[in-house]
Amino acid sequence: MKAFSIAALGALLALVVPDTAWAYCQTHTCEFSNTARCDIDPLTGCSSGGPVARWDTACVTYAVEETGSSRSRISPGGLSAVLNAGFRSWSDVECPSGGSPALAAAFRGETSCDEVEYNCGAGDGNNNIAMFRDGASELSSTTIALSTIMARLSTGEILDVDIEINSRDFDFYVSDDQARQDAHDLRLVLNHELGHFLGLSHTRVPGALMRAAYDGNDRFPAADDIEGICRSVPSGNDPSCTAPALVDGGACVGPDSACAPAVEQDETGEAAGCSYLAPRAHRSATQWTLSERAGWLLGLGFGLTIFLRGRFSSSRASARGQRRAKMLHG
């Protein structure tokens, strides 16, 4: 196993930016670790440094935590249906140069695991999990949703993505006839999170799905998002995608004992096993930061955060909200 590591990119992003159109941003490995310099474009806010984060396969899989959300009255089946439709909304876009992204997603089922984790040696025991957080969790009260991405620093290959949805502090609905005051459109929230799942970062382009502001309207990929996904995922026919059966009913695989501060070199000269970074204390919520996700494993976290309920905000946080532009997400 080649070395990889995860760094927790701050879930709370609140950087004031003007409403000016620029371009989509791709996630780079410099955002995962301080082992590579991240250069930030002053106009777009995009990072550059190290390989672009991407999947090595056109067939991605996902699972949902088996309890759903009793607070938002959304079943695991309802959650998986939103995710399935969300993946299609990204794979069915028409690229400017023709064709559409060669991308398909397969559902592995409902898992008993509700942890953000990745185990180097667990193989198919690892799952890309979407889970609600009805009760106590590490999510702050201003984070709507958080995607944690694990990837190889040397190549940018994405290995695992887990999505946490803050149903403790926010209410969600699935269909328009279920919409209620102060509730958030789960389809919009998860379509944005799936953009991160597929390697996109926040854009400053107004109206884009990947813009770091929740307005309740940008449910589907807009022109800027389409350019980004067509750059990140090669065009072609969607593959026939099947998902391996859940191992042990989808039980958590736990931390990997092979991950250690000291690693040996393999025959290629690269570190064997998993590289290790010590956890970092949570820092400011008003800028891009590194924050703690797990002691043995560091990941790229994108937070969907709101600034204040019912208030306008032009700050840069993470993702989408109601009719008013609220600060949120990643």
Image: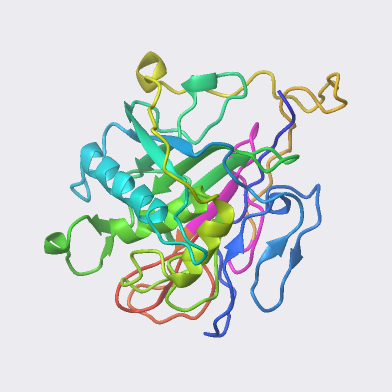
Q: Nearer the viewer, residue 317 or 187?
A: 187
Residue at image point 42% right, 61% down: 94
SS majority, magenta: loop
Q: From the top left corner, tell me how far across and down residue 81 is, in percent.
A: 25, 44
12 relative to 218 in the view: left or right? right
Q: Quadrant of the N terminus?
A: top right
Q: Is residue 318 visible?
A: no
Q: Is residue 175 visible?
A: yes
The count of marks equals 0
Q: From the top left corner, tell me how far across and down residue 313 is, in percent.
A: 45, 80
Residue at image point 71% right, 27% down: 274
266 relative to 280 in the view: left or right? right
Q: From the top left corner, tell me how far across and down residue 101 is, in percent.
A: 47, 51
Task: Give the extent of the magenta segment.
Answer: 284-303
Q: Give above or below for 250 relative to 75.
A: above
Specify whether residue 191 is painted magenta: no
